[in-house]
Image (tube, rainbow, N blue to C red):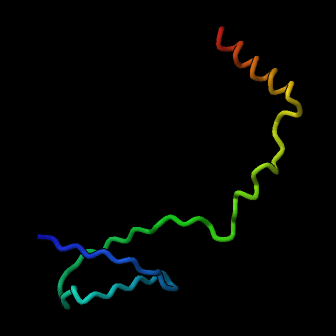
Amino acid sequence: MVHALRKKVTVKPGGIVELRSRELVPGSIVEVIVIQEKQSPKGIDLTRLIGVGRGIFSTVEEVDEFIQGERDSWDR
């Protein structure tokens, strides 16, 4: 039977991962699998970009014209 041990640890400088457990028997063979959690870059708040970009259309009429052109292309 396989005994699983799951722990969350912090990677130390140099990429070192240290795991300590009283459940581990000295001299026994173990398999270690490391799964890194996805992290968003620190200090970047993308919500501040909402509404500050300029769109590709200058007017509402240009938007309507583009949409009508797309609809017309469906009928072809």
Return the residue nearer the eye: 41 or 49: 49
Q: Quadrant of the N terminus?
A: bottom left
Q: Residue at x 18, y 88 (%)?
A: 25
Q: Quadrant of residue 2?
A: bottom left
Q: Residue furthest right?
A: 58
Q: Quadrant of the C terminus?
A: top right
40 relative to 20, above or below = above
Q: Residue at x 70, y 58 (%)?
A: 46
Residue 45: percent from left, percent from top: 69, 63
Q: Residue at x 81, y 20 (%)?
A: 65
35 relative to 52, above or below = below
Q: Quadrant of residue 70?
A: top right
Residue 75: percent from left, percent from top: 65, 9
29 relative to 42, above or below = below
Q: Residue at x 38, y 86 (%)?
A: 18
Q: Quadrant of residue 26?
A: bottom left
- Answer with left or right where residue 36 lies relative to residue 33: right
- Answer with left or right where residue 33 lies relative to residue 48: left
Residue 11: percent from left, percent from top: 47, 81
Residue 7: percent from left, percent from top: 34, 77
- Answer with left or right where residue 48 lies relative to residue 38: right
Q: Residue furthest top?
A: 76
Return the residue nearer the eye: 73 or 13: 73
